[in-house]
Amino acid sequence: MLHPTSLPGMWGSGDFGKSAYDFIDFLKETDQKLWQILPLVIPDTFGSPYASISAFAGNTSLISPEELLKDKLISKKDLIKIETEIKDKFERKEQVLNIAYEKFIKTNIFKKEYNKFVKNESFWIDYTANFLLLKEIYKTKAWNEFPKKFKNNEKISTQWKNKNREKLEKIKFKQFLFFYQWNKVKKYANKKNIEIIGDIPIFVSYDSADVWANNSIFKLDLEGNPKVVAGVPPDYFSETGQLWGNPHYNWDELYKCDYLWWISRIKHTLKMVDYIRMDHFRGFEASWEVPLGEETAINGKWVKGPGKVFFNFLKKKFGDLPIIAEDLGVITDEVRDLRDEFNFPGMKILQFAFDSENNLFLPQNYDTENCAVYTGTHDNNTTRGWYNNDATENDKNNVNKITDYDGKNISWALIRLAMNSKANWSIIPMQDILNLDESARMNFPGTAEGNWKWQMENLNIPKEIKNNLKILTEKTER
């Protein structure tokens, strides 16, 4: 498990350039078969890919300038000038993309491919470009602060679109570049027999193109404000629960329109990845609704979701769904039944497994092979950080006993436990492969600052680690 932003890179974050291909080569060299990523959408101001302003648009900061150079959309002279004159790495990337667009307009490089992309992505590309431009122009906190004539995509006039045609085309072209480069990365991975596990957050941000353009499928009042917002009750991560703030779906309205928005979202995602990790899966059975204005998630309530009706509809459209159900948190028999009805593998997290020998996350207690075992997820501390700082003495005693831990490398003690388990899927965060401490943690749920920033310095992975991973993979017949 490694998000592309965590790859080594010189432009503010990792991207779809050489390091992405080198990482795939590392996976191939060590006999790995799966690469799990986080959502590739535009992150929020805190960097979270789980709070995007679009469920469809890609994070254009992942576009590789070096790949643009190969495609003759920018020159080496341009890159040198940008690196010399612009200090901020993200501003550099924007200038690179602006130059690439100018080159596209002048030369018509990729014109045919671009036109095909815009046609194929017509469900979302137009309204999303309109929204992104309005956000750029008005810089509002949320779309409900737009001038009245822009409160919904349907109100956008042809005159406004014509007036801003070039700006809208530039936004769409940047999206084209994102998907063009990612598709090349995915194709390279698949050629090496490595499949990609993507991620769909169940909810979308209130301040998103999707809510702005599709008011009727969300629980909003007449002014367009959310009636209730999403979160989870108090749990392992937070005593007051997690107040996410996303609007809830109007599932009755979605049912009336044959779940068109969701069908389009899943179809879109399956073009990008081979499997989908369905984040907060339990929300499809019932979700935690908190009245707007609450400061914590404590005073919420469970409200029934679309359940089997929704997934039966998806099954008719897509056949057997390549979904991993993120079934963590408050899980009921109804949630388990929904997961098992459609044969979705659930998730087992080893960092949660050691409070007792009866814990269901312990491999010895798995009642099925149809599950995915993780040492930890993007929401957990690294295994080394967990063991040194978060694990109780009881946890440590059980870890030591169950894994025969010798005190040298706790990450690999749990990696061996995961890979030797009966679980069909074994997915390990790259931080644990490298046995990194808490400074490499990706996200701390319930906090906004300081997350999503971890980045590998390089891909010079020690030969010993490569050999250990390859040998363990062979021994466990993974």
Image (cartoon, rainbow, N blue to C red):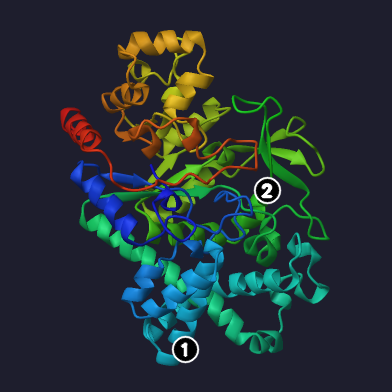
Q: Is residue 425 left or right of residue 137?
A: left
- Circle 1 or circle 2, nearest the eye: 1
What x and y, as percent, mark residue 302? 68, 34
Residue ID for mark 2: 248
Picture residue at 63% right of the left edge, 62% below the top: 210
Q: Judge by depth and name the residue closer to the eye, 454 or 245.
A: 454
Q: Quadrant where the N terminus lies?
A: top left
Which circle marks residue 105 in the picture?
Answer: 1
Picture residue at 30% right of the left edge, 50% below the top: 23
Which circle marks residue 208 in the picture?
Answer: none
Q: Judge by depth and name the residue closer to the eye, 399 or 267.
A: 399
What x and y, as percent, mark residue 284? 56, 42
Q: Amino acid at mark 2?
A: His
In this figure, what is the number of numbered marks? 2
**What crowding class fits label 1: few (fewer than 14 Cα within 10 Å), some (14-19), or many (20 or more)?**
some
Q: Is residue 276 above or below residue 148?
A: above
